Image (cartoon, rainbow, N blue to C red):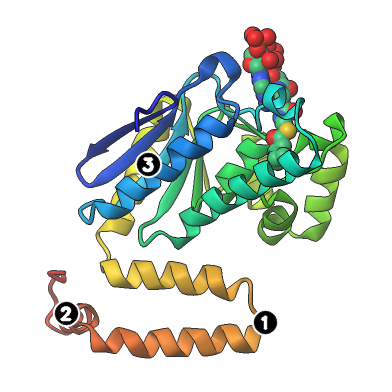
Amino acid sequence: MEFKILKLEVTNKIALITISRPQALNALNSDFFAEMDEMLNQISANKEVRAMIITGEGKAFVAGADIAEMSNMNSEQGKAFSKKGQDVFYRFGNMDIPVIAAVNGFALGGGCELAMSCDIRIVSTFAKFGQPEVNLGLIPGYAGTQRLSRLVGLSNALYLLMTADIINADEAFRLGLVQKVVEPEKLIEEAINVANKIGAKGKIAIKMVKEVAIKGSMLNFNLACELESKEFGNLFSNGESGEGMNAFLEKRKPNW
Ligand code: CO8
């Protein structure tokens, strides 16, 4: 596939995806989802890659789903477009590696939903977040109604979903929507630092801690704890945990 919207650079085992349709503030259209699906296939197939970072070109991370494309849709097409976006974004959570959103500017509507589908959000002081769909007579369609409340609590989520307020990076940090706010010129550097920090841990442990945390957040507490015990136990059957614990006891760095 020829990529027209997404750019990929793999450096030192980190895949950096840049969404590049700045003339439309990187709005998400059908081509975007087709390209992202294929790019995720390629990155997942590359076992060298230890982390993935997603950022946007220009003044937006993503200013939402493409309103021009949506304006011609009927109910069936709207539902399919919503489902396609949900499915593609869901794949970030299923990846074995950390997926980091490096939010450079507007992350509105589908852009906020994209950022929320990533594991971690590192953002520039220029970042702005919001779910302004009700201004258009719509609601979020890429799981924003569900992920926002899981990240910031139902009361904050309802406030943002119903007022359509656009909040800045500091307010997003205060609400727990983002993990770090940095100067714009430091954004990618900081995202890479976080990626490297995680990349230095045991690969299987990172895959499993992500899987158990994400899956567990969708289960009731007892089932989630059962899942945790099961996967905790499974980690003893691979060499990685043996090396990690031996390294501690021998006062050296693990050699994964
Ligand atoms: N879709 C399509 N084009 C867009 C979008 C968008 N979401 N956002 C901006 N653009 C385009 C503009 O139309 C404009 O194009 P042109 O130059 O051809 O007129 C260009 O990008 C630049 O935008 P502006 O001139 O508006 O730039 P400003 O700096 O003045 O304003 C804003 C920036 C505030 C971000 C403004 O562009 C804006 O409000 N954008 C729309 C934000 C929005 O409402 N987002 C939510 C969209 S709905 C959504 O995401 C639903 C997700 C779930 C979908 C489920 C499937 C059905």
Sequence-first tag of 1 and 2: 1
Q: Which residue is mark 1?
A: 220
In the image, taking residue 54 as reference, residue 111 lies left or right, namely right
Q: Which residue is mark 3?
A: 39
Q: Which residue is mark 2?
A: 243
**Label 1 is placed on what type of residue?**
Asn
- Whether ligand 1 has any atom under 8 Å from the Cβ at mark 3 is answered as no
In the image, taking residue 171 as reference, residue 40 lies left or right, namely left
Rounded to the nearest whole Å, what is the CA distance between mark 1 and mark 2?
33 Å
**Label 3 is placed on what type of residue?**
Met
Which residue is at the front of the view, 89 or 160? 89
The residue at the point 57 percent across, 76 percent down is: 216
Rounded to the nearest whole Å, what is the CA distance between mark 2 and mark 3?
33 Å
Give percent across and percent down for residue 141. Answer: 72, 46
**The residue tagged with tag 1: helix, strand or loop?**
loop
Ligand 1 position by quadrant: top right
